[in-house]
Amino acid sequence: MSEDIRWVKTQCGRMDHGGCTLLVGVKGNRIVKVKGDPEGFLNKGYICPKGVASPDRLTHPDRLKYPLKRIGKRGEGKWARVTWDEALDEIAGNLIALREKQGARSVGFGVGMPKGLDHFVLIRLANIFGSPNVIAIQDVCHAPREITGLHTCGFYPVADLHHPSKLILLWASNITSTNEEGAICSQLLRQVRDGARLIVIDPRRTALVRKADKWLQIRPGTDHALALGLLNVLIEESLYDRDFVGKWTHGFDDLARHVKTYSPEKVSEITWIPPQLIRETARQFAQSRPAAIQWGNPIEHNIHTFQTTRALICLMAVCGNLDIPGGNIQALDPKIMTLGQFVRADLIPEKRKEMISAHHGVIPRLMTVASSFFRKAVLEGTPYPVKGFYAMCSNPMLSWADSRQTYEALMKLDFIAVADLIMTPTASLADIVLPAATHFEFNDIGHYGVGQGYILARPKVVDPPGECWPDMKILNELGKRISPKEHWYDDYNRFLDDVLQPSGLTYDQFVQKGYLKGPDKFKLYEEKGFQTPTGKVELRLSLAEKFHIPPLPVFEGLPEEDDPDYPLILISSKSPYFLHSSYRWIKRLRDKQPNPEAEIHPETASRYGISQGEEISVETKYGEITYQARLSEGIHPRVVNGAYGWWFPEAEARSQYEWKRSNFNILTSTEKLGKAFGTPNLKGIGCRIRRKG
Ligand code: SF4
């Protein structure tokens, strides 16, 4: 039997950032088996439960297979099947009408986390159409680290898991549950097997705590205070890299004076971490070189994210771990088309001034619009009205803070089109819904534009069902209808050729190689200096005054002040079985985690009379939802970890799949936003719990 199976090598995609090389067994046009490729560039045979279940998406009975047009009231769940031409003409007609009436900027183009090349084709479409408004999740994922890096040291410092480190500080990063832009767990485990030590900083006892020397069970939302406490010890005890600091940093004396006030004792009161553990961590970090900080995106989940990421980069710098093998590096791209060229940034030179977020004074170089600002534009017309929305690979009803506000904004828009795999709470509010092809069903390039220094070949394995199209094809065909045809192709596969063109490879040749990686070059600053105004790592930010932000990484307080009415602290964490709001509809994954759960400490549960598995209410100042209690010793008694991204695909479409019942973002708010990126508080929020019924 096994002789009938054709094996295809490709990359996992769209279950997280992707990156595991897979061997996919196919019979006819059907995938029958998937396994990790022992020779995989990043994963060396590893595959997670999401990867194993990923083919189930292709044949799911609820999969969208034809374009649909709304025939009832918005959100009523009544649809008529239409042809692709009808659907695309309808979208184009609406977008062009809006552009003529209110300008191209009255249309927002929405996208979730980057999953493949289509992410950047969407930005190209927005640019060519003339809208500066790409609504993405960068304010809570990636941008704080990347943009702060650009301003502080001239690059986005990623943990180098490809070269041996002596110590890896896993700071709010649990890569056993999900990979961080390709930082696959097996890479980390390989480092640990080869002798790297681990320190885990996390409010929860994650699986990797078992392998760690130390676990710092931090109070949620106080990471920047901890980083300042570590800097205090490093500087007070003269443990920093004097040579690097003397030659390559700007503002060290100011930083040293500044962190004097953050003694381990003071920081312990803020972070709940014992002072001695702060001292020992600082010493171990300083004495282990090279050391890398593998930072997860929870540090970007509160209004103080800019100062937090600044403080972490200062830590990397003063210990001399920037841009050395096994430290935090500037990952250089292989010879491929630059992002700016690919998205045709040249066609929209006024984007920075014109985009919605410019009005809110965000930090320069943030090129997408935070969802909170987008909704302000829709609901209040600030700074100008936005009336149309084209969204793909995203489910804002679940994934943006304050879902009630999202619902209101979507209901107010004149026109919405959504491309997705199945009907979601967001798609259910659209005027046109387009059936997208999923990974395995088209040729793609992974990891383009995410700053890791490599791209991955994801060749097609099978044909999509019904009339599903790859998003790249949808965008290409829509592009021809709403902008000059010369910017678009007869065959959307030409986008892949564009990216590869400088490498001299065809897509087939690229597939043979599997990946392209940039050169390993370190200490580039020795040739050119750091790409900052001072040519050094800016511990003190030289443009701070211009940006209206503090020049040194100050601790600006808790995300929310303590409130006796909401005595517990709410966080969320990534599930190993789902990607944000995706894939509750895949039985194999849902069986592993059938219900939305809130993790609470047994002591806390007993105080509130709650038993394992009982239905509970979790309430913040902003809303209340239902979870099932999961008791765990691995969480602090004051912290509640609520599952994120839950809706119920089995519920009725006209209820928007019960989007309010257990949706974490009913508990969040956009009242307070960080100045640099427009980031709301997604964690560290005061809450209370009670048994239901
Ligand atoms: S870790 Fe990510 S890339 Fe690897 S198999 Fe799982 S979902 Fe796919």
Image (tube, rainbow, N blue to C red):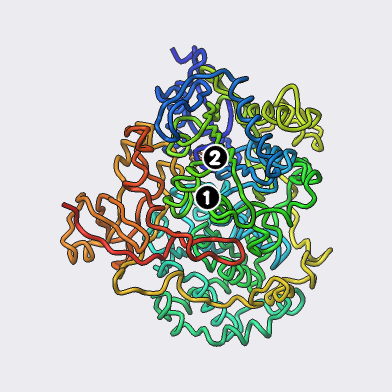
Q: Tag 1's secondary structure?
A: helix
Query: Percent from the top left, x then y, of residue 352?
Result: 73, 55
| Residue 44: mark in rendering | 2
Task: Judge by depth and name the residue closer to the eye, 611 or 674.
Answer: 674
**Amino acid type, mark 2:** Lys
Which quadrant holds the N terminus? Answer: top left
436 vs 586, left or right, is right
Query: In which image quadrant can residue 94 be found?
Result: top right
82 vs 485, left or right, is left
Q: Mark 1 points at which residue?
A: 190
525 vs 393, left or right, is right
Is label 2 in contact with label 1 (beta carbons under 8 Å)? yes
598 vs 40, left or right, is left
Instruction: Answer whether residue 454 is visible to the viewer in this image.
Output: no
Query: Percent from the top left, x then y, of residue 253?
Result: 68, 85
Query: Which residue lies at the image location 41% right of the left edge and 74% below the top edge?
Result: 561
Query: Which residue lies at the image location 39% right of the left edge and 68% below the top edge?
Result: 217
